[in-house]
Image: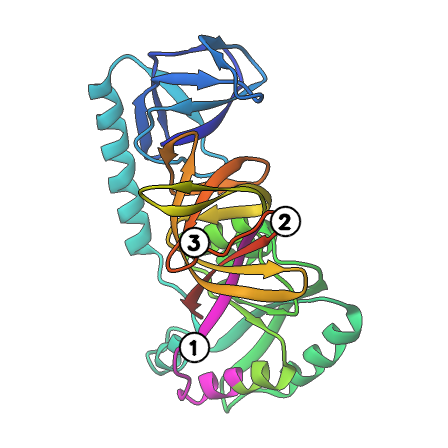
């Protein structure tokens, strides 16, 4: 596994045992931003390291510890803490709204609304203010234009609100935080479907829906053959991230030439779970070999909203 780290103080050296979040490992190699192998890295230096057990989450702080045993103990403790926190956080979702009201756990549906332009936001707020069933009220706590970010998720978590997005996206960090904090994040392109879902939730009739969540884009720089994987696309991630096992859409000019699974993802001959913006990687597809330089990959996941 290859992870990208930024040294903030001290010196990081090959052979150090590192802990970052719930990932750990003894560093087998360190490369600088040019891909050149280095023995050590000082403060304010971004590096790619090889030897971690997993890819750390963006924003995780890393530390050098004395031994692999100490690293395992720290990670085990953090995993237990995360489990305890997850169990204590009950997700507020549209599907559960009616049951929560019946149990006396909720009296209002709190919403945070994000839209692409003010011309969309105003009629959405007007429609939402019309909704409400009996003692159940609909409260728009915050509404503005723009994509969904970390601040929106933090506000939703603190106020037990649901985030509604219209013709906007949620960035990668915001989606991760929403999952961690148990925040229901729902995206729409048609206003009446948004209001219809909320009306059904207020009546206890809403069933889970599937939505597409955009992860990132990459451009194919070159194509080569590998005996194990077939055709492999050498790509550079130009937005967000690519994630192994996610869905991928291949666009050639204005045409979609393939939709399917991103079956393999490698960076510098190492299998990786994800590759973030600015890095190059090798991508393999399930049942697709007609990939060409210049093609654009759109990576996404289908999940229950």
User: Which comes sooner in the sequence, label 3 or label 1?
Assistant: 3
Is residue 91 visible in the rendered structure shown here? yes
Find the magenta span and give its range.
Answer: 197-218
> Nearest the camera: 184 or 5?
5
Give the number of callouts. 3
Is 206 within the magenta?
yes
Which labelled disc corresponds to residue 294? Answer: 2
In percent of width and height, residue 158 lies at 50, 56
> Nearest the camera: 88 or 65?
65
Residue at label 1? 209
Residue farthest to the left?
Answer: 69
| Quadrant containing the N terminus in the rendered view | top left
- Alpha-carbon distance for marks 1 and 2? 34 Å
- Alpha-carbon distance for marks 3 and 2? 38 Å
- In the displayed structure, 69 sits above or below 97; it is above
Which labelled disc corresponds to residue 218? Answer: none
79 sits left or right of 274 in the view: left
Q: Residues within 10 Å of mark 3 (few under 14, many from 20)?
A: some
Residue drawn 39% across the image and 36% down it:
55
- Alpha-carbon distance for marks 3 and 1? 20 Å
| Quadrant containing the C terminus in the rendered view | bottom left
Residue drawn 77% across the image and 68% down it:
117
Which labelled disc corresponds to residue 181? Answer: 3
């Amino acid at each position: 596994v290859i992870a990208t780290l930024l040294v903030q103080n001290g010196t990081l050296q090959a052979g150090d045992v590192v802990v970052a979040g719930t990932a750990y490992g003894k560093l087998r190699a360190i490369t600088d931003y040019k891909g050149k192998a280095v023995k050590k890295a000082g403060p304010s230096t971004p590096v790619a390291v090889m030897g971690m057990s997993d890819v750390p989450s963006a924003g995780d702080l890393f530390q050098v510890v004395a031994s692999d045993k100490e690293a395992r103990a720290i990670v085990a403790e953090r995993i237990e803490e995360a489990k305890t926190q997850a169990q204590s956080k009950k997700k507020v979702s549209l599907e559960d709204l009616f049951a929560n009201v019946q149990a006396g756990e909720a009296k209002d549906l709190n919403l945070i609304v994000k839209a692409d332009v003010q011309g969309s936001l105003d009629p959405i707020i007007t429609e939402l203010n019309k909704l409400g069933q009996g003692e159940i009220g609909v409260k728009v706590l915050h509404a503005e234009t723009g994509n969904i970010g970390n601040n929106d998720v933090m506000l939703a978590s603190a106020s037990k609100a649901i985030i509604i997005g219209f013709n906007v996206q949620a960035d990668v960090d915001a989606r991760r935080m929403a999952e961690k904090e148990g925040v229901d994040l729902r995206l729409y392109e048609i206003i009446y479907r948004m209001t219809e879902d909320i009306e059904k939730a207020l009546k206890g009739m809403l069933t889970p829906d599937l939505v597409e969540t955009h992860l990132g884009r990459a451009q194919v720089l070159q194509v080569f053959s590998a005996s194990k994987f077939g055709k492999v696309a050498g790509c550079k991630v130009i937005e967000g991230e690519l994630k192994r096992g996610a869905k991928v859409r291949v666009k050639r000019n204005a045409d979609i030439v393939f939709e399917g699974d991103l079956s393999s993802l490698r960076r510098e001959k190492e299998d990786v779970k994800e590759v973030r913006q600015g890095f190059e990687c090798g991508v393999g597809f399930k049942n697709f070999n007609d990939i060409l330089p210049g093609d654009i990959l759109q990576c996404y996941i289908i999940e229950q909203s």
